Image: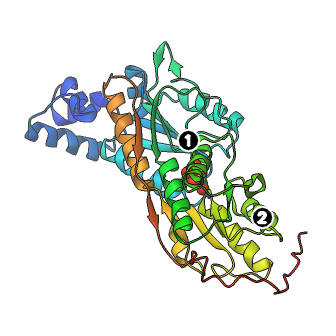
Amino acid sequence: MSARVNMHHIAKRAKVSLGTVSHVINGSAAVREPLRQRVLEAINSLGYQPSQLARGLRRDYTNMIGMIIPDITNPFFPALVRAAEDVAYSHLYRLVLCNSDNDPQKEGFYMSELQSYLPAGLLVIPAAGSGLREQPVRNGRPTPMVCIDRKPEGWKGDMVRADNEGGAYAATQHLIDHGHRRIATIAGPQHLTNAQERLSGFRCALKEAGVRLPPEYVVHGQFDRKSGLEAALRLLRPPSRPTAIFAGNDLMAMGALLAVRELGLRCPEDVSIVGFDNLEVSELLQPSLTSVQQPVYRLGSTATELLVQRITGLNDASREITLETELIRRNSVIRNSAATQTQGRKQRVPASQ
Ligand code: RIB
């Protein structure tokens, strides 16, 4: 069996020094173009495959960025991951993705597993109840890490998120401006900071407008469609049925739309609904969903740019970057005065009750 091709073979074939080969492969110093071409031709003809692992061992980190997210099947996350990969790629880093399933234990497992592969840095969208508190340390040196979208309790490192509170405030204000006074919310999981911030924006808009919020108008879901459906079925029971619902994300808003149908009601005529995230599919729903747009791609790209700066030596105090949201007005909200309430109309009893 022939010996594994290494840098010595390339140096010999290209008739250059070992140092020149190393500079071309590692980009560690400028090499004159004719020499660089000779090295590249030698690499090609010998079929040399550089080992990132060997390079990583020499530097104590590889060109890999580890990314842990809750769940790639949730349609909110793909654009964010795509942005992270685009930025990582443009800076010659490679992205490795792990799903925590929103389970802090699985998140912890992936954290230490990724660390053992000597990553250049880490991007994390923390799980609900995440145990992350500070930058992880490997061999006495902190591994650069940026949290995105949700802030773990006590986290003091870099953080990039959307203006959850402002977005929720604008969504609620929109309902108030449309004459609604019986406004309920399906808030996200209580232990997630983004869910807390959205609930706080909702409360604040109602308070400022002097709109009463009965305690039963605040129910919690799990940021998924099923819990949105269950929560809305509870909220929409007469006699205190709200005329509008602000859902903490679009998946729960979709669940609320299903509940409206299951109860024989109509959106927006009987119940107006606003979501949060502005998923691509939300425009295609019937009716199209009014929703707060998060700058999803920019969340990923901003966080990854910041991480790359940290990897390459940016050393100032940790940063917390908040990106603006925008209310996208569609057809799921109607003026309350024009709403044809289903008074007297018989409601269907849902199968699940
Ligand atoms: O649907 C996923 C939700 O959880 C989004 O609202 C996003 O902010 C994430 O944290």
Q: Earlier in the sequence, mark 2 or mark 1?
A: 1
Is residue 115 shown to the viewer in this render?
A: yes
The crowd level at tag 2 (other Cα within 10 Å; few <14, some 14-19, many 20+) is: many
- Please give the name of the residue rendered at 88% of the width and 70% of the height, measured from the top-left corner: 352
The image position of residue 302, as x and y in percent, is 37, 44
- Please give the name of the residue rendered at 55% of the width and 49% of the height, measured from the top-left corner: 201
The image position of residue 244, as x and y in percent, is 65, 68
Per the image, label 2 sits on a secondary structure element best described as helix
Residue 311 in the figure: left or right of residue 237: left
> Is the CB of mark 1 within 8 Å of ligand 1?
yes
Pick the front one: 53 or 221: 221
Q: Quadrant of the C terminus?
A: bottom right
Pick the front one: 123 or 98: 123
- Please give the name of the residue rendered at 60% of the width and 58% of the height, measured from the top-left corner: 249
Q: In which quarter of the view is residue 120 placed?
A: top left
- Residue occupied by mark 2: 235
243 in relation to 266, above or below? above
